[in-house]
Image: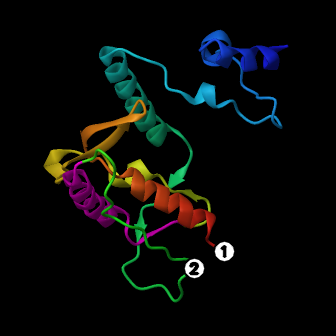
Amino acid sequence: MVNEEIEDCGKWGLSPYHLFPKLIWSKRGGRMNHFDLRPKQRSAFRISLGKRYYTVKRYIEWFTDQKKYAKTINDEELPFVSSSHQTILLRKLKDVDMWYQHNKVKNLKIAIKRLNNIIVKPGETFSYWKCIGTTTKRKGYVEGMVLFYGKFKKGTGGGLCQLSNLIYWMTLHTR
């Protein structure tokens, strides 16, 4: 019954998300319904409050959980390369000024200095944001592109998602 109603929504110009916000599974093999992945509209105050809440929550977890976080730095070259990858840093995007791309490269250089040569030993947890810390102008970060509600805006440290995505990709492809 629900699937037929979802298909009928399009005929009337309605979004199934508004009719069935708690619907998680689609009729195709139990995959997540993409409508549930849309961010909820929040006021600027609520967004600011939420950002502070999750930042404090993360710091509390770092200091109270039993995880051992990777922080050992090894400056000597390791004997072999497990995986490597190159990615385009400057890319012309539709309706995006190139200064976002140039500033992204500046931010990536700063962040990479904090991550380069970190050794993750067995039993340790790698925390991207624990290693990088807050992205402030005092640390040299500049305004770059930040994704926000499906659009982009400028924000200090913008562009670092490219580095976190690269680390994720490298982890998946490491043998």
Q: Is residue 164 left or right of residue 173?
A: left
Q: Is residue 54 left or right of residue 152?
A: right
What is the image's colouring? rainbow
Residue at the spot x=36%, y=21% of the render? 47
Task: Look at label 2 and name its amino acid.
Answer: Ser
38 versus 29 height, above or below: above
Q: Quadrant of the N terminus?
A: top right
Mark 1 and mark 2 in contact (Cβ < 8 Å)?
yes
For the view shown, which residue lies furthest in the left direction? Answer: 138
Task: Look at label 1 and name its amino acid.
Answer: Arg
168 versus 78 height, above or below: above
Residue at the spot x=48%, y=37% of the render? 61
104 versus 81 height, above or below: above
State the SS at label 1: loop
Q: Pointer 1: what residue?
A: 175
- How many marks do you count on the picture? 2
Q: Pointer 2: what residue?
A: 82
State the SS at label 2: loop
Q: Is residue 45 magenta?
A: no
Residue at the spot x=44%, y=73% of the render? 86
Q: Residues within 10 Å of mark 2 (few under 14, many from 20)?
A: few
Residue 170, given in percent of the width and then of the height, sits at 54, 66
Magenta region: 97-120
